[in-house]
Each structure stands twice: as C-alpha cells, then as structure tokens.
Amino acid sequence: LMEAGKANRLPHALLFTGPEGMGKSQFARQLSSYLLCNNPNDAGNPCGNCRGCQLLAAGTHSDLKHILPEEPGKAIKIDVIREFTEKESLTSMAGGYKINIIEPADALNTAAANSLLKTLEEPVDWTLMILISAKPNRLPATIRSRCQSYPFTPPPRDEAVAWLAPQSKGADPKLLLSLAMGAPIR
C-alpha cells in the first residue's frame, strides 16, 4: 500500500478485514498519517513536523474523516452517509488524498450501504475510502466487490508473544494472547 501510495496508484476503496484486535484500525490510522504527511520517511512513518502531521495530531485535518455509529453497537444510518456524500467534499482541501474511514463498515444499515455504494461506483480521484470490518460477510457483496480487500490474520504465536512481552506489565504474555484468542492488540 505504501508503494501504491508513493506511485499514486492506490485503489479508491480498501476493505480491512479480520478478527477484532488484529490492528486494522491502527493500520488505517498509520496509512492515513503516511498519506497525509508532506514528508514521510521510507519506513512509512509520518515526519511529525509538517502541517499535515500537526493537523492530524490536533485531530483537525480536513482531509481525514472517520465515520462511526452514533453510539457503539448501533447502526451507521443513511443520514450519516448522505451528509458525508452530499455535504462533505470528497476532494482534498490540502491537495493530496482525502481519506474516509468507515468503522465498523458492517454497521452500515441497508439504506446507508446502498447510499455508500453509489459513491463507490463513481470514485473521485484522490479520494480513499477505508472500510474496516471484523464481519465482512455482513456487508453487501456489491460493496465488498468494489473494494480491494486486505485480510488481517493472527501473527505467528512466537512473534505475538515477543511483541506483547514488553507491554504486558508483568503479566504472562502467553496467557494474555490465549485469552485474547491470538489477537495481540486485544
């Protein structure tokens, strides 16, 4: 994705799938930070100093929109998607990418999904939609088919334990990973 971003060849819609706790949201935020930074390094890290990074840090970057349900566990309603597609500009204010993250995408109700589908069918240049879902089969096939899918799977157990160990604050990282069903972020 970094290479595609550098070459300005990103698809218009990405679908990050996989169990909860795999880092899909964190990856979407990191990718967004990379794409909205004016001077990212080759490792995919934003510089932290440019105007884009400052706006992201303040939570005020006009080219990043996060669409969530009004309340956790509730549906994303058509009004939210209509406002996004009609009132919200789908083009960048800063001249680069306009990024829209929908999480969890499987929370879209039927009317909202149909409204989003129209946007996915007629993509706008330099606009990236990132849909995040632990239950992608709940999304209409028409939406899934218009996104480039990236499945997030549990890492090898040894790698996950090694990553968790310094963060486990004295708890057994193997036990924590087992309790989280192999999902290290969980």
Image (tube, rainbow, N blue to C red):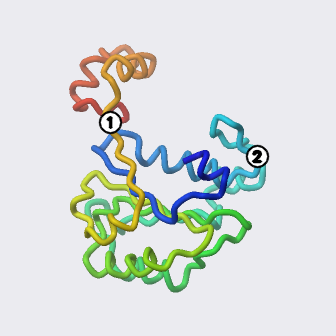
| Whole-percent x, y for residue 1 in the image | 54, 48
Q: Which mark is residue 186?
A: 1
User: Tags 1 and 2 in contact by the CB under 8 Å rule?
Assistant: no
For marks 1 and 2 on the same chain, the one whose residue lies earlier in the sequence = 2
Q: Which mark is residue 119?
A: none
Q: Residue at x 42, y 63 (%)?
A: 102
Residue identifier under label 2: 39
User: Real-space Cα distance between discs 1 and 2?
Assistant: 31 Å
Q: Is residue 35 left or right of residue 169?
A: right
Rendering coords of residue 112 (x, y %): 33, 78
Q: Secondary structure at mark 1?
A: loop
Q: Amino acid at mark 2?
A: Asn
Residue 52 x, y percent position in the rendering:
72, 55
| Displayed quadrant of residue 36 | bottom right
The front one of 2 and 185 is 2
Q: Considering the image in quadrants, where does the C terminus appear?
A: top left
- Callout 1 amino acid: Arg
Q: Taking 64 as reference, is 3 above or below it?
A: above
* Residue at point 69%, 63% (across, down): 96
Q: Is residue 112 above or below residue 69?
A: below
Mark 2 neighbour class, 10 Å CA radius: few under 14, some 14 to 19, many 20 or more: some
